[in-house]
Amino acid sequence: MSATTDRAPTREDFAALLDESYGQNEAFEGSVIKGRVVAIEKDVAVIDIGLKTEGRVAIKEFTGYGRDPAPQVGEEVEVYLERVENALGEAVISRDKARREESWVKLEKAFETNEKVEGVIFNQVKGGFTVDLDGAVAFLPRSQVDIRPIRDVGPLMNVPQPFHILKMDRRRGNIVVSRRTVLEESRAEQRHEIVANLEEGQVIDGVVKNITDYGAFVDLGGIDGLLHVTDIAWRRVNHPSEVLTIGQTVKVKIIKINHETHRISLGMKQLLEDPWQGIEAKYPISARFHGRVTNITDYGAFVELEPGIEGLVHVSEMSWTKKNVHPGKIVSTSQEVDVQVLEVDPVKRRISLGLKQCLQNPWEAFAEKHPVGSTVSGEVKNKTEFGLFIGLDGDVDGMVHLSDLDWNRPGEQVIEEYKKGDMINAQVLDVDVEKERISLGVKQLAGDPFASVSAEEGGELRKGLVITCEVTEVKDSGIDVKIAGTDLSTFIKRSELARDRADQRPERFAVGEKVDARVTLFDRKARKVSVSIKALEVAEEKEAIAQYGSADSGASLGDILGAALKAREETPKKAKKDEEE
């Protein structure tokens, strides 16, 4: 027999046994233990957890959110032991915390293996919802509820359904789940199965599910296909809503299937005959047709020739005269127009049309109405460094070059006398229909002074002829003169004013004074004429010397010239006397 049995237990022995007992009980705190229901009192279950103590758990912790039925007396359950004894001498236990501990272990395994877990949406919070995952509370963001935004979440509340765990943090007790990924996964499987049964070229019925600016989505029985706006009809469709409505049943053809992305392209016009077949024979080049303007762009206008067939009238082919203007200022949408076929490309499905070709060429009309040599009147539209632009009949412009403004004065000087808005007359010099150019002249209306110039004696103006000129202006460098009997003007330089240098002074002459001179240059093609007083004096001197002797014969130059002058004066007198006799 031991020493302990030999004597009665002391106070110290009892304290040691008590500490040992409590120490064992404390080891169970913070863990899940099994207990037995010993009684049901109203909404509370009394549970004996052993350890010589009992605890109480609310019935709703067993039955909340569609869980197990309420426990019965004698049934064994698992609870979480928070504390062995409270102030009332009862154990503090919890069924929720027991379930949460069990759930965390299962959820962590599911999260690692990316398995779905079952839960119940039981409350709505800011930004989403709370989900009961068999005791563990998770957060369901609003964006993760469904594939598409849903307005009413009521039917989803308090219904067991699968979720995917997106994130877990046990230290903080945070769990984020998604219902959307489950739906997408299920939808992907369903789409894969449906797509596997579809083939390109297959004709199938579908229901218009959604309409956008670029087309319509058609439900093919669990999977959507895109019907692009350009594949709805052969004709131009500005918006799918012009042809389709949501809920409408349509027959479509599968154009293309992408088995990787499960995208399906559909077409409706492919079920109809292609109007571009044999297009070249139907619309030969240069033929004219009547059409309707369907669309206007910056570069031209589209004209519908028949349903499904459109041609482009480029802005350059819209008007003969209106250049660099927006097509919308020439035609309007839905306007009926006549057009001419310029080019047909069946491969690119393009037809080039011309609008102006159906109208008379204004340059041809002008040439017929105003032949070369006729006189026209118009308004000065613009002044440039090379001439004037004149507005003429038929909205065409003609140009007067600087060289055609005046016969005598330089064009740069004459053009300053004109301004925008002036009405002027001009002569048609040339009309180039292909280059769309009309050449006009102003000086031609006054007649060409070189055309019929003649001397006072009636002979044609030529080099060496002696003529009479009238001084029109005196300058330091010479004098301006006008040839008598003509409209020609010319300039006599200082050096050509006299034979003797002392007499080469412009101030010797006065405006209006008549002087004789000799023509030293007359070029009708170059339109140049030069005269010289000096040349006349030199010529007269040579003639006098030849007729009356030379200075070497003893006669002075003054005697020779005097005799010549006297003979020149007597010649008219003798001719007059002969006429009288």
Image (cartoon, rainbow, N blue to C red):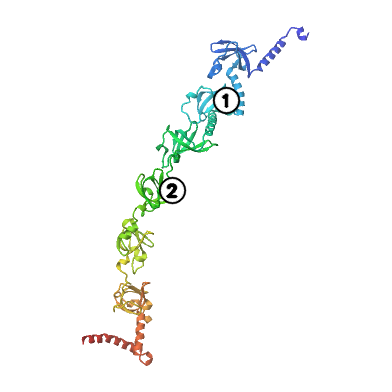
Q: Secondary structure at mark 1?
A: strand
Numbered disc in front, either 1 or 2? 2
Quarter assignment of residue 360 = bottom left
Q: Position of residue 503 (x, y in %)?
A: 35, 80
Query: Are there few (<14), some (14-19), or many (20+) residues within 10 Å of tag 1?
Result: some
Residue position marked by numbered label 1 in the rendering? 117
Q: Which mark is residue 350?
A: 2
Q: Position of residue 339 (x, y in %)?
A: 37, 50
Which quadrant is home to the C terminus?
Answer: bottom left
Q: Position of residue 428 (x, y in %)?
A: 32, 63
Side of 298 relative to 177 (left or right): left
Say if residue 284 shows up in the picture: yes
Quarter assignment of residue 492 = bottom left
User: Is the residue 238 above or below the residue 25 in the image?
Assistant: below
Side of 425 relative to 327 (left or right): left
What residue is shown at x 41% (from left), y 39% (from top)?
239
Q: Amino acid at mark 2?
A: Arg
Nearer to us in this view, 515 or 336: 336
Nearer to us in this view, 258 or 314: 258
Q: Position of residue 476 (x, y in %)?
A: 36, 74
What residue is shown at x 38% (from left), y 91% (from top)?
552
| Mark 1 in CB contact with mark 2 (< 8 angstroms) | no
Say if residue 422 shows up in the picture: no
Quarter assignment of residue 388 = bottom left
What residue is shown at x 62% (from left), y 26% (from top)?
109
Q: Amino acid at mark 1?
A: Val
